[in-house]
Amino acid sequence: MFNIFKKFGNLSHDIAIDLGTKNTLVYVSGKGIIINEPSVVAVNTKTTEILEIGHEAKKMVGKTPAHIQAVKPLVDGVISDFEITEKMLKHFINKVHGEGFSFLPRPRVIIGVPLDITEVEKKAVEDAAKSAGARKVYLIEEVMAAALGAGLPVDSPRANMIVDIGGGTTDIAVISLTGVVSWKSLRLAGNELDSNITDYIRDNFNLLIGEQLAEKIKINLASVLSFEEERTMEIRGRDLMNGLPTAITINDNQVRDAIKKTIIKIVESIKLTLEETPPELVADIYEHGLYLSGGGALLYGLDKLISRATKIPVIVVDDPLSAMVRGSGSLFSDEDLLKKITSTLSV
């Protein structure tokens, strides 16, 4: 009987998942990225029924009646709501196998985790994936996966430095011989930049805006250095003085001012990581450069700012938003490397 289940299990797809604070990406071996949806689940609190997952659930954020909650089950890159995360993973895994028939599909799954994740948090990720239908769960450090996605030789003695700025965390690491030599993990990333923008607009304009608008402002106006031409955007929110709807226009210079403290902290942490790195490895980094991945890598001018601060060439990886999941997925074609750089939980 076991052999029968194993045989059917082999019909399932190998899956790599970037279980992010903001978005979940799913990579299928041989097919590439087939799912990229917000990590949001809409729940009816009266019946505990899952109403929507992903894009449709995100549309409900800040707009739901009392009995419906738009839940974000991951905070700072780790699971905060196990049951909802399990259902979200199950939804995405079923969506993958919905493309073709597979009896009792139980895929091998690779999931990226932050550098500072605890053993308890690791167990929560593994258990959620197992409950969602995984046959074997592999955990990989997100920076290692991002380095693989950037095409870096992580198994060589050469040092590779990567900074992955996601939604919940910024991970900074120096990698050599499939291990992390020096690192820092910050709870300062995309969500923090959204909060910076919300706070700035509240403090300077007495205007309260929602998190989706803050993210939209970040995408359209946020930068580290000045654009060639000024960018502006009309935004609407609630006036805190009279409670009425109000519209104002903000520009990219104001948004840069809003996020600068967080950006400075990230740059200082990169410099501190370099200071703690063995000199032989620092020499490699100066020669080959520092790599930026994650959504934060798209901030205009961030690569130039880091390069000026560290005197090191900075390279933004190709398609930085998907580098981590592409790197994870590439491991299915290299079983030896897969075993070296992941921890596993068999089912």
Image (cartoon, rainbow, N blue to C red):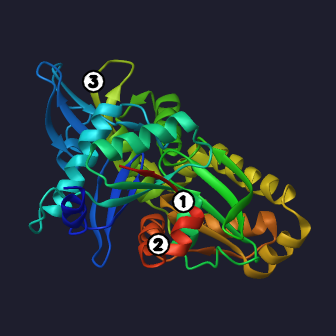
Q: Do the residues labelled 3 and 1 touch (CB within 8 Å)?
A: no
Q: Mark 1 points at which residue?
A: 342
Question: What kind of residue is marked 3?
Answer: Leu
Residue placed furthest toward the right = 279
Disc 2 and disc 1 in contact, CB within 8 angstroms: yes
Of labels 2 and 3, the one closer to you: 2
SS for dot 2: helix
Q: Does residue 20 appear left or right of residue 199 in this picture? A: left
Q: Residue at x 71, y 71 (%)?
A: 177
- Label 2, residues with CA under 10 Å away: few <14, some 14-19, many ≥20: many
The residue indicated by pointer 2 is 331
Q: Residue at x 59, y 43 (%)?
A: 188
| Residue 276 placement (x, y as % from top left) | 85, 55
Q: Is residue 9 above or below residue 123?
A: below
User: Residue 2 bears which disc, if any?
Assistant: none
Between the C-alphas of marks 2 and 1, the distance is 10 Å
